[in-house]
Amino acid sequence: MRILGWILAVGLYVLLGMHVYAYFMVICPLLKQRLGVTFGMTWAAIGLILLYNIVFNHFLAMVLKPSNPQDLQKVEEMRLKAKNRQHRRETKDDGKDDRFEGLHKDVKRLMKYKTKTIKDL
């Protein structure tokens, strides 16, 4: 079944390639002849954008692993665990300025100076 999927995907890309060839060899000269160069090139650009969108999204749908909301919850839990690691908790300030929460003391001090003007220093 897995091999059949790849065969069908390659067949799809071959079919798309034939359509692109026909588009540029048959339809684009007709567009140029009937609509003019500028309007014909605009339609060619729109066709290429649509083709890119189809191929890109189909390829990503084939390659990426499907997921569900539970996977998103696992990722969020891992992010919270990484945020609340021990070495990050040690650097918490008095709670005065939580813009710099989790940063090293020296970085906090530098960031506070960065937000001040020369006159404030």
Image (cartoon, rainbow, N blue to C red):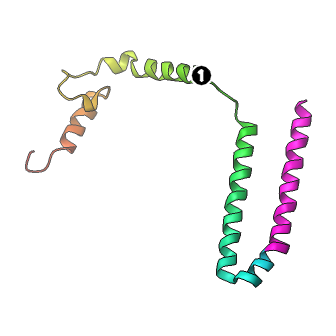
* Picture layout, residue 3 above or below residue 79: below
Quadrant (top left, top right, bottom left, bottom right) of the C terminus: top left
Is residue 54 found left or right of 77 in the rendered image?
Answer: right
Quadrant of res 96: top left
- Residue 14 pos. (x, y %): 88, 54
Does the magenta-highlighted stretch encompass residue 21? yes
> Which residue is depicted at the point 70% across and 77% down?
40
> Closer to the camera, 75 or 33?
33
Quadrant (top left, top right, bottom left, bottom right) of the N terminus: top right
> Which residue is depicted at the point 86% across and 68% down?
22
> Closer to the camera, 17 or 28?
28
> Which residue is depicted at the point 87% across and 61% down?
18
Quadrant of res 25: bottom right
Q: Main secondary structure of the magenta part?
A: helix
The residue to which callout 1 is attached is 71
* Picture layout, residue 82 above or below residue 42: above
Identify residue type, mark 1. Asp
Number of marks drawn: 1
Q: Which class describes the residues within 10 Å of circle 1: few (<14), some (14-19), or many (20+)?
A: few
* Picture layout, residue 70 above or below residue 108: above
Is residue 65 found left or right of 29 in the rendered image?
Answer: left
Q: Secondary structure at mark 1?
A: helix
Quadrant of res 108: top left
> Closer to the camera, 103 or 81?
81
Is residue 81 found left or right of 24 in the rendered image?
Answer: left
- Residue 85 pos. (x, y %): 40, 17
Which residues are drawn in magenta? 1-27
> Which residue is depicted at the point 20% across and 22% down?
95
- Residue 58 pos. (x, y %): 74, 45
